[in-house]
Amino acid sequence: MEYKDYDYNFIREKKIIGFINLIGAPVERKEIKEYAINLGIKDRTLSDILKRNVKEAKIKRLSHGIYIGKCKMFYTYDNHYGEARWCINCGQPEAEH
């Protein structure tokens, strides 16, 4: 494998992660797979990409076949007693992101 091939695969991987982050809501794997097929990525390679990026905390796996990008919007209660802010998309506390 030449360096050019690796660089090209890295660009395609960044496009997939960008797609997941762009949606901003939970995404099913079949939607990610459709996008990956358009990029020329096979199913097994997509599995490796998703697994690696979940491990590196670039994306989050909510349940089997459902992924979400980095959460950017949080909400808090209006009582201002120092309670933690919660994610709008996945419901996790901000400290766990």
Image: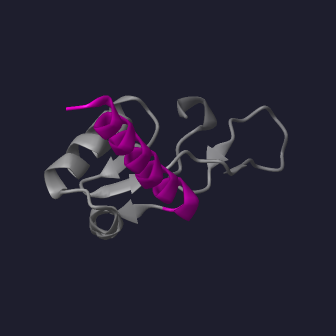
Magenta stretch prevailing secondary structure: helix
In the rendered image, residue 16 lying in the magenta stretch gets the answer yes
Quarter of the rendering occupied by the C terminus: top right
Left/right placement of residue 90 relative to residue 45 reads right
**Image colouring:** one colour
* Count of numbered badges drawn on the protein: 0
Residue 47 place in picture, x, y as percent: 21, 48
Residue in view at x 24 percent, y 51 percent: 46
Q: Say whether residue 24 is visible.
A: no
Is residue 56 shown left or right of residue 96? left
Residue 15 visible (yes or no): yes
The answer to which quarter of the image holds residue 35 is bottom left
Q: Position of residue 8 (x, y in %)?
A: 37, 44
Q: Residue at x 83, y 50 (%)?
A: 78
- Residue 12 sits inside the magenta stretch: yes
Horizontal side of 4 relative to 85 (left or right) equals left
Residue 57, located in which quarter of the rendered image?
top left
Residue 41 vertical placement versus 83 (above, below) = below
Q: Residue at x 76, y 49 (%)?
A: 77
User: At which x and y percent is residue 51?
Assistant: 27, 39
Residue bounds of the magenta highlight:
1-25
Q: Quadrant of the N terminus?
A: top left
